[in-house]
């Protein structure tokens, strides 16, 4: 595998994609869980703090009442209450289920009355406590900030907050209860999900990269197979086909390429046939010219009659060759794509002109020529090319119509389309010949046998010109009754 071949790129992209997608999902999930836990911790701290304050206040009231019933007063009462609180507070808090938190109780002058554990003493919060005593409002100190991302690689750290709650003690003095909730349970939850999440994320990445790689390899193998098959098709042997591998995009590509090869094959075949037909058509006049040249050489100097005959024949054959080469050139130009003019012209005027020209050439046949009904029909296009097509059709109509027959041309405009209708009452075309009528060098058997007409290129030229003009041509014919050609052309716009 070349390092940066398509396969290499796809492998790199699929691994990168898997890492980004799965890593992104895993990271987002972790942050959401950690953030949720942090909110739970903050809420729990607040809840524990207010519950702890209620319990502590209750304890103060109860223990004060008990000391008073013993008849204690003044400093003695205060000392006694302190001692009682130290004994009873842990039990009271434990009885209320507030075991996960750390408590410390300070009196009005800031001296420590009681604490649940030495970790509950936060000297750094002294200022905050003094503030609570002077304002009587709860305050919070952030002891340790949460570090979300740390939990991805080491133990999670959700942060610890201390809530300083004002508390009424003996008499009117205000003490402070420090409550800190240590989120070890919540941190454990995060620590516990870390490993399964990591394993899951890595497995998902591997599976995703593997699936992407497998499907890409499958596609690339199909493409490779197609390439090998394409390589094996010789430019000269267009009868072979690519394997059409299934009903997928690669199969569709193979089918498209096969259609292209088929079209190229048909075209190559048509070209070969065309060259063969053209050579064949040229061979006849060339053979004629050579034959008459030999006659001229042998007897031309002695016999003026033979000489005249040979010269006439050579002239006739060379004219025929000139006609054929001109037809071939016309066809070639039309096939290569014509450069069409875009000008406004009167179609009916052109039709009348072509009819007059054909009539003058076929005057001895006694055919009746009939033109369009309307004076004019304006369209936009290349008048020269329209004239060419009309000349071919009218020439044919006159050629294949006998004396007393009629050749007529009608024109219409329907919306944006122009229709030209060229009809004759000639000998018609056999049904079987109609599908091949526009093929190059096609001539009906009858025309061939009678030696009538040209080389069978006229209609092929007309069709090729009309293709260039986005037009169409169709034929209908009844042997012995006549032939009708129907042309449609876009009316065109300037
Ligand atoms: P050609 O120059 O030989 O006439 P075309 O391509 O113009 O070649 O015509 C091909 C063949 O179609 C002709 O040989 C003839 O058999 C037939 N054909 C064309 N037009 C007509 C028509 N109007 N009436 C009868 N046959 C026709």
Image (cartoon, rainbow, N blue to C red):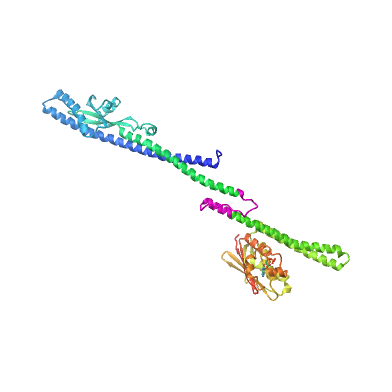
Q: Is 364 located above or below residue 340 in the figure?
A: below
Residue found 62% across the figure and 60% down from its top? 467
Give the farthest residue toward the bottom. 404
Left or right: 20 as drawn, with respect to 294:
left
Say if the magenta span includes residue 240.
yes
Percent x, y of residue 187: 33, 33
Residue drawn at 61 percent across, 56 percent down: 263
Closer to the camera, 141 or 202?
Answer: 202
| Residue 29 can be seen in this image | yes
User: Residue at position x 84%, y 67% from top?
Assistant: 308
- Residue sitting at the far right: 302
- In the rendered structure, does residue 188 fall within the stretch colored magenta? no
Q: Position of residue 425 (x, y in %)?
A: 66, 74
Give above or below for 283 relative to 53.
Answer: below
Q: Which region of the structure is painted magenta?
A: 231-258
* Residue closer to the observer: 17 or 242: 242
The residue nearer to you, when weighing 484 against 91, is 91
Residue 337 in sight in this render: no
Would you identify the image quadrant in which residue 157 lies? top left
Position of residue 389 measured from the top left corner of the image (x, y, whole percent): 66, 64
Residue 409 location (% of width, % of height)? 64, 70
Q: Quadrant of ligand 1?
A: bottom right
């Amino acid at each position: 595998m070349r390092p940066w071949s398509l396969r290499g790129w796809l492998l790199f992209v699929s691994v990168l994609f898997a890492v980004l997608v799965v890593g992104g999902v895993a990271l987002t999930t972790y942050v959401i869980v950690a953030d949720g836990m942090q909110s739970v911790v903050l809420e729990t701290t607040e809840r524990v703090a207010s519950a702890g304050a209620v319990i502590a206040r209750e304890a103060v009231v109860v223990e004060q009442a008990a000391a008073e019933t013993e008849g204690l007063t003044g400093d003695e009462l205060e000392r006694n209450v302190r001692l009682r609180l130290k004994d009873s507070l842990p039990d009271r808090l434990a009885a209320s289920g507030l075991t996960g938190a750390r408590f410390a109780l300070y009196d009005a002058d800031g001296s420590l009355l009681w604490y649940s554990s030495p970790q509950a003493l936060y000297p750094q919060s002294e200022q905050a406590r003094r503030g609570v005593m002077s304002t009587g409002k709860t305050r919070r100190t952030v002891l340790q900030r949460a570090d979300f991302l740390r939990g991805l690689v080491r133990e999670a750290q959700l942060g610890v907050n201390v809530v300083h709650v004002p508390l009424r003690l003996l008499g009117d003095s205000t003490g402070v209860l420090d409550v800190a909730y240590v989120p070890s349970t919540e941190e454990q939850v995060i620590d516990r999900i870390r490993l399964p999440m990591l394993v899951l994320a890595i497995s998902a990445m591997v599976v995703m990269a593997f699936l992407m790689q497998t499907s890409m390899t499958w596609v690339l193998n199909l493409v490779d197979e197609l390439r090998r098959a394409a390589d094996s098709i010789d430019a000269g042997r267009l009868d072979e086909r690519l394997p059409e591998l299934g009903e997928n995009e690669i199969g569709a590509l193979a089918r498209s390429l096969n259609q292209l090869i088929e079209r190229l094959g048909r075209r190559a075949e048509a070209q070969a046939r065309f060259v063969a037909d053209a050579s064949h058509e040229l061979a006849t006049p060339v053979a004629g010219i050579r034959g008459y040249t030999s006659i001229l050489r042998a007897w031309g100097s002695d016999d003026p009659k033979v000489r005249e005959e040979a010269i006439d024949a050579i002239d006739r054959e060379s004219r025929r060759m000139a006609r054929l080469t001109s037809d071939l050139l016309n066809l070639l130009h039309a096939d290569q794509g014509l450069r069409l003019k875009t000008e406004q012209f009167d179609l009916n005027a052109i039709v009348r002109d072509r009819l007059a020209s054909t009539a003058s050439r076929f005057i001895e046949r006694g055919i009746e020529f009939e033109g369009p009904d309307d004076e004019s029909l304006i369209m936009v296009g290349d008048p020269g090319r329209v004239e060419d097509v009309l000349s071919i059709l009218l020439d044919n109509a006159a050629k294949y119509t006998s004396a007393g027959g009629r050749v007529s041309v009608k024109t219409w405009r329907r919306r944006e389309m122009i229709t030209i209708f060229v009809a004759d009452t000639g000998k018609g075309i056999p049904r079987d010949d109609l599908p091949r009528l526009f093929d190059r060098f096609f001539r009906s058997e009858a025309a061939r046998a009678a030696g009538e007409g040209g080389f069978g290129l006229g209609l092929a030229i007309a069709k090729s010109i009309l293709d260039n003009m986005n037009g169409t041509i169709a034929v209908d014919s009844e042997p012995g009754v006549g032939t009708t050609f129907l042309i449609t052309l876009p009316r065109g716009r300037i």
